[in-house]
Image (tube, rainbow, N blue to C red):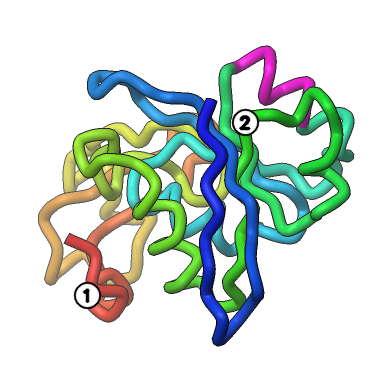
Amino acid sequence: MYDIRMRDKSRWSSAVTSYSDVSSDATMKFIADVMLGRLAKRMRLLGFDVLYERTLNDHDIIGLSLEQDRVILTRDRALTKRPLAANYIFIIHETIEDQIQQVLSLYPHSLCSRPYTRCTSCNALLVAITKREVQDLVPEFVYRVNDDFLRCPMCHRIYWKGTHIKQMDIP
């Protein structure tokens, strides 16, 4: 277990981040508290397994973290002080870009999952589907200019690499 103190005097005086040493072939799994829904969604877009549900309380988050070996992402100092909440990252930044950089800076690049592989809504792994299968499910323009589509097997959302992906500058 490591205890890292990060100093960013322009934003916060200090924050404690605690996380376990992870082997390079491990896949990182996270659980985000109610204050970090946007971070959870963006990390899912990057391909990370991030459990997020607004109805989970601190007790539920800690329990799921322990049961499923997930790192807790939180902005709640009280949660970080709970004895069983030993594996967490206290998010010190306000902007989503800085929050992402904080999380990514704590783990080697090899631990990052593949972008565009998880549903941003429900966290399920996306599956490739043919262009023909989405013909009546996406706008006509989207159908014309894209060849690659993905579908969530749980909530049935359709994904494609549109201009919003390019604007976020995700590889």
Instruction: Kindly indicate the quadrant of the structure image that contains residue 51.
Output: top right
**Labels 1 & 2 near each other (Cβ < 8 A):** no
Q: Secondary structure at mark 1?
A: helix
Mark 2 is on which residue type?
A: Asn
In this rendering, the answer to whether 165 lies above or below 114 is below
Name the residue rendered at 61%, 59% in the picture. Answer: 91
Q: Position of residue 45 (x, y in %)?
A: 38, 53
Q: Residues within 10 Å of mark 2 (few under 14, many from 20)?
A: many
Give the extent of the magenta segment: 62-68
Where's the C terminus, which quadrant? bottom left
Q: CA distance from mark 1 to mark 2?
A: 33 Å
The secondary structure making up most of the magenta span is helix
Residue 1 appears left or right of 169 = right
| Of the pair 83 and 166, the residue shown nearer to us | 83
For residue 64: magenta?
A: yes
Residue 24 % position (x, y): 24, 24
Find residue 3 and report its horizontal and vertical position in percent. 56, 39
- Which residue is found at the position 12% from the left and 70% from the top? 145
Residue 112 appearing in the image? yes
| Above/below status of 82 relative to 16 | above
Single out the mark in the foreground, 1 or 2.
2
For label 1, the crowd category at 10 Å Cα-Cα, with few meaning under 14, some 14 to 19 and many 20 or more, is few
Q: Is residue 141 visible?
A: no
Residue 131 is situated, as x and y percent measured from the top left of the image, at: 17, 48
Looking at the image, residue 68 lies above or below residue 51: above
Disc number for residue 87: 2
Residue type at tag 1: Lys
Rendered position, 21 above or below 91: above
Residue for badge 1: 166
